[in-house]
Amino acid sequence: MIKKILVPIDGSKHSDRALDYALDLAEKYSADIQLVSVAQPVVATGPMFLTQPILPPASTAMYVKEIEAAHKKMLSEALKKAKESKPDIKISKKLVTGRPADKIVEIADKGNFDLIVMGSRGTGGIKEFFLGSVSDRVADEAPCPVVIVKYRTVKRRNDGHSIT
């Protein structure tokens, strides 16, 4: 039985689509939803002989606050959209800091979630190439089923036919 659904939010079209999917499931199963956004910590690297941080501590702290503020805004917008779409569903939000896949799995485990619904791709890019997709890691390590929702745009040729 699906009673608690965890939905990671990262501001991408993929996570927006996943939220829509989760809302439909929650309505069907009378489940609660928790939105989570994971602000990844700043990792600065440089040559081994550097003794000074790349950014002064004050700059780093300000940068971290800006990242957290952006995640708070994403969560608030997602929560507002979800409540407007499905006002009868109980929806909460949570902001955490850490490595996204690790935190999503940890929250799902500690919160006894029945399902994770997440986008197939996030706002990553080249880092996904090196670190692996967050959705892949969550699917491998999660303590519950994971639904990975794809967002696909259909491109059209000049003659109106779709290109895949």
Image (cartoon, helix red, strand yellow):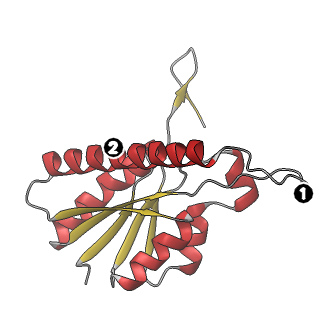
Residue 73 - label: 2
Q: Residue at x 83, y 54 (%)?
A: 51
Residue occupying the point 56% across, 80% down: 141
The residue to which callout 1 is attached is 48
Per the image, label 1 sits on a secondary structure element best described as: loop
In the displayed structure image, the side of residue 20 where residue 37 appears, left or right: right
Q: Secondary structure at mark 2?
A: helix
Quarter-of-image position of residue 140: bottom right
Q: Where residue 82 sits in the image (x, y, percent)?
A: 21, 50
Residue 14 lies, in percent from the top left, at: 46, 48
The residue drawn where x is 38% and y is 55% is: 18
Q: Nearer the viewer, residue 64 or 157?
A: 64
- Residue 160, compared with residue 46, is above or below; it is above
**What mark, if any, has residue 39 been given in the picture?**
none
Given residues 46 and 78, the one toward you in this image is 46
Q: Earlier in the sequence, mark 2 or mark 1?
A: 1
Q: Nearer the viewer, residue 161 or 74?
A: 74
Crowdedness near tag 2: few (<14), some (14–19) or many (≥20) residues, C-alpha within 10 Å: few
